[in-house]
Image (cartoon, rainbow, N blue to C red):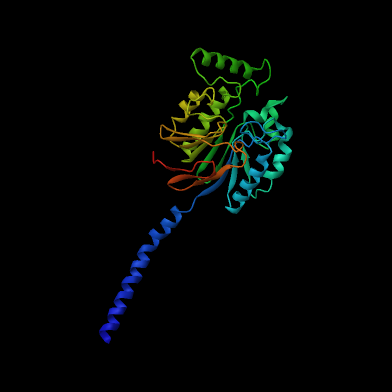
Amino acid sequence: MKQIGLKIKREWKFLSIFVICSLPSLFSMAQSNTPVLRIGIMADMQYADKADHGSRFYHNSLMKVDTAVDFFNRNKVDFSLILGDLVDEGPKDLPVLLEHISPLKKSTYCLLGNHDYVNVSKPDLLHTTFGMPAKYYAFTKGKWRFVFLNTNALSEYATTPNSADQHEWKTLVDSLQTSGRKNTQPWNGGVDRKQLEWLQNELAQARKNKAHVIVLTHHPLLPENGYETLNNREVLDILYQFSEVKLVLSGHHHKGNYVMANNIPFVTMEGMIETATSNAYGLLELYPKEIKIKGQGRLSSRVFKLSSK
């Protein structure tokens, strides 16, 4: 009986040591399964009070936004991102859309798309109507830096006649057409010189701060399929200098897309406006060692491992 008692005591001692030794790894595993940030994402709602056209169902965007907002709140996102084209015909329809976005319990950050500029007389001030701090901007959450580019800056629709920006746009388009590029469509735009310098400085500062960077754009940077930012290659030249860039997330091309280039995933989100009832929204989850896009409806789900470089 005494031997049995000693055996049980030894086994319990061994089990206790095993549990104590396992706690750090179990804690680490729990941490790795918990996102550092959970973010709601959607793009190209293009709400308008007008009749449907083709595959675009403008009134239905309100119902789709309601579904996305409820999903974001239930999943307790830290904040939400909207990647442009909130409305189809400029800010006249924005108040109605904002009523459906306002139930979000956490902050929303957006950037502008080409449709947001329709019938706008003062494009330089449009960002204030959409509640943005500037035409392009950045902020930090933990170890992550979010950089919002304005890919509309060089375009006919976002510049005023005879302005320096419009002259820069015309010069850029002439150069692209001469070289045979197919992205010189009236709905595409580019990034101005001042903004490129700002981007370079932003990424350099992120390197000093040892921050991970996510770049947000309306017009994609890749692939080159006619929907990309006019001077995408200039932007890419800057991004490729910095391994801190872990993701580029865009809208504009409603079919969606994905390219991996220079160890950076370039994701184009599927547009919410397309189809009568099928939605497109999701969660962007940031983990210590990976990025997950958890799509709902037409939005594609993806997982990217974070490189150590």
- Taking the image as drawn, is residue 106 in sight? no
**Residue at (56% x, 16% y) in the render:** 173
Looking at the image, which residue is at 57% across and 27% down?
A: 195
The front one of 212 and 66 is 66
> In terms of image quadrants, where is residue 158?
top right
Residue furthest out toward the bottom = 1
Q: Position of residue 35 (x, y in %)?
A: 49, 50
In the image, 9 versus 186, the foreground residue is 186
Relative height, residue 254 to residue 65 (above, below): above
Instruction: Pinpoint residue 184: horizontal percent, then vertical percent.
Output: 56, 19
Up-down relation of residue 47 to residue 287 (above or below): above
232 relative position to 64: left or right: left
The quarter in which the C terminus is drawn is top left
* Residue located 63% across and 47% down the image: 67
Using residue 229 as the reference point, say whether residue 163 is left or right of it: right
Query: Which quadrant of the figure contains the N terminus?
Result: bottom left
Query: How many marks overall?
Result: 0
Give the x, y percent position of residue 103: 68, 48
Residue 307 falls in image quadrant: top left
* Residue at the farthest left position: 3
Q: Residue at x 49, y 23 (%)?
A: 234
- The x, y position of residue 20, in whole percent, is 37, 66
Asked if residue 282 can be seen in this view, the reply is: yes
